[in-house]
């Protein structure tokens, strides 16, 4: 029987800032605040937005 490793490995998050890809842990307070306010892409939201766009375009025509 094998022992199960329950420890987690720390994960370093990188983000593009000022044209460079850098670790988020190195961001200053202002850049980190801006990073936290960003919205992440989800496929479900993009499909809903696409359907809404088509609906608006039909009304505009």
Image (tube, grey):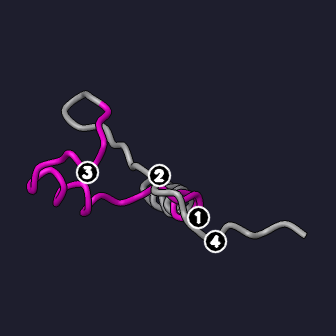
Q: Are marks 1 and 4 in contact (CB under 8 Å)?
A: no
Q: Secondary structure at mark 1?
A: helix
> Dot 2 corresponds to which residue?
61
Front disc: 3 or 4: 4
In the image, is 3 to the left or to the right of 55? right
Residue 22 placed where, x, y %?
A: 29, 36
Front disc: 2 or 4: 4
In the picture as drawn, the residue positioned furthest to the right comes out as: 1
Assess whether residue 26 is covered by the magenta stretch. yes
Front disc: 1 or 3: 3
- Which residue sits at x=29%, y=58%? 38
Badge 1 or badge 2: first in the primary sequence: 1
Q: Quadrant of the N terminus?
A: bottom right
In the image, is 5 to the left or to the right of 49? right
> Dot 1 corresponds to which residue?
44
> Dot 3 corresponds to which residue?
25
Front disc: 1 or 4: 4
> Dot 4 corresponds to which residue?
6
Which secondary structure dominates the residues rendered in magenta?
helix
Range drawn in magenta = 21-48
**Tag 3: Cα neighbours inside 10 Å, few (<14), some, or many (≥20)?**
few
Residue 49 placed where, x, y %?
A: 49, 60
């Amino acid at each position: 029987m094998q022992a199960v490793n329950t420890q987690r490995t720390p994960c370093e998050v990188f983000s593009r800032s000022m044209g460079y890809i850098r670790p988020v842990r190195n961001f200053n307070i202002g850049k980190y605040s801006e990073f936290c306010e960003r919205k992440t892409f989800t496929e479900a939201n993009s499909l809903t937005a696409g359907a809404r766009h088509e609906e608006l375009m039909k009304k505009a025509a």
